[in-house]
Image (spheres, rainbow, N blue to C red):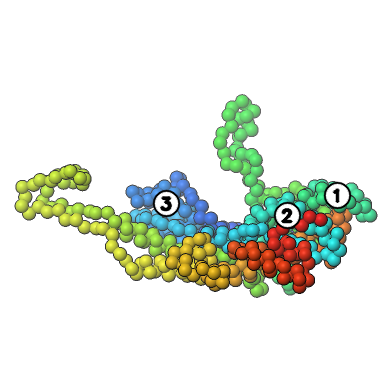
Amino acid sequence: MPFDFTNFETDSLNPDFVDWLVDEQWVNMQTHFGRLWDYYQNPMYSTTGLSAADSKLNESARTYIQAQEMGLPARITGIKRSQVSGLLGGKAVADIERKEVVVENDIGWRVNAMVDFLFGKGVDIVSRAEDKSRRAEIDKIIKQIFNANGGVRFFQDMAVLGAVYGFVDCIIRPGQKIADFAQNLSSSSNASFKQAMEFVSDCGLELIEAPRALPVLDERDFRKINFYIQHFIEQKNDVANEGNFLRRLLGGKSGSGARQTSAVTEIISPDFWQRYEEKRLVEEGRNIMGIVPVVHIQNIAQPLYYEGISDVEPLVPLQDELNTRLSDRASRITFQAFKMYLAKGIEGVENRAVSPGRMWCTDNPDASIEQFGGDSTTPSEDSHIAEIREALDKTSGVTPVVAGVLKNKLGNLTSAVALRMTLMGTLAKTERKHYAYGQGLKEIAAMAMHLLDAANIYPNSKEERVFDVIFPSPLPEDTLNKLNEAKLKQELGVPKEQVLRELGYEINT
């Protein structure tokens, strides 16, 4: 049996079940979540070495393929693909040439625009501790923890992963300094605040993308994580090439080979953790936190499911339809946009170029040259493409106005109220995500403070682990109106520190 969970001292962790998660469930997840990421990023691949794609290269084809081509019909690509063969596989269809392939990634910019609305201006996480001095210290600690883990980039990465996959997990990890401090010092000793700030940057916040996550949930409550397992392929700084060592030993040059990789499995329980590589135990240790140090954040809530709702998945069929119609239109334009000529009764015309200054002569009185081709309007095609884009707008909640494409909507943006009405769908979705991601950030901050307490670095109570998350408005605002609003809030008794934070000012204590 490859996994040995004796040190976890529990019967709830079944090695056979973990084997099934890693060998079967994880493989199935790669296909599903990998497709979502490909539709978001739409990476480009060379056709070199792809027999099916190479066989379809012609004067109308490009030397690369894109991930979203997976959703195009075989009548356009000339390749019949399946879920098993994937984008880089498939079988060439006889008698069907590859046509003009047009891929316009309408998913990527919509996801990025939503991330900009959610975390484009950063976020402020503030303590609600009653004691003012403690509140100021906790604020400094939390700010330092997030800054050490990427700052605004951490928030934006979180939003991208959540939007694409439907959820994102965050593991709070004690670094080596924190682990050593917790192990070497007695429970009665703790660090001063100055010393604590030196340890704070060693608190790691690791975002776990959905294809890695294999949580073992409580059978009676899907919201509770009993054990957290992640499985992934780790790339090593070495080359996997048989005979490489022997050639170096004999003084020869090492041959080229693939980069070495290793399948990593990590299991975390409230009291213990293990790390396996290729199902061989390489590390293990005690979990000093006493809880599963994982915060789960759903992108959009989905009742009774661990996974949330992805922003990408509902857009995939519409994106496929858009790319299909754009490719059809490109093929039509290819045939119709250029003038073509039919010459009758003129000898040797096949060797003559059509260009200015040339004259064709013949003694045949019945000779003629007929012109045909040229683009023509197709209102139904244009209308269909426009309706697909509108469907993408409604499904995603993100309109082209968000990306700065105004077109004929300029007259609607003459006031702040009109702008909010125009962006109502995006703003409503942003507010919904404010709660989901805001709650997740509160839990991450609380769990980080719990880690510092468990390690005796900065002892704190459960009441001091309550936070507020302040999201700045994504829309441009009138400074004078904001100041007047802040003044009214202060007159109503809102704390001065909170008012200044909402205005974007740093508070020095």
Q: Does the image show residue 17? A: no
Quick one: label 1 or label 2, which is nearer the N terminus? 2
The local secondary structure at tag 1 comes to helix
Across and down, in percent, residue 484 comes to 68, 68
Across and down, in percent, residue 106 comes to 49, 61
Q: Nearer the viewer, mark 3 or mark 2?
A: 2
Q: CA distance from mark 1 to mark 2?
A: 18 Å
The local secondary structure at tag 2 comes to helix
Q: What type is the residue that disc 1 sits on?
A: Lys
Mark 2 lies on residue? 146
User: Which residue shows up at 80% across the image and 51% down it?
Assistant: 200
Residue sitting at the far right: 188
Q: Quadrant of the N terminus?
A: bottom right
Question: What mark, if any, has residue 52 been given in the picture?
Answer: 3
Mark 1 lies on residue? 194
Quick one: label 3 or label 2, which is nearer the N terminus? 3
Quick one: label 1 or label 3, which is nearer the N terminus? 3
Foreground residue among 484 and 402: 484
Question: From the viewer's perspective, is 482 left or right of 465?
Answer: left
User: Quadrant location of residue 254?
Assistant: top right
Q: CA distance from mark 3 to mark 2?
A: 47 Å
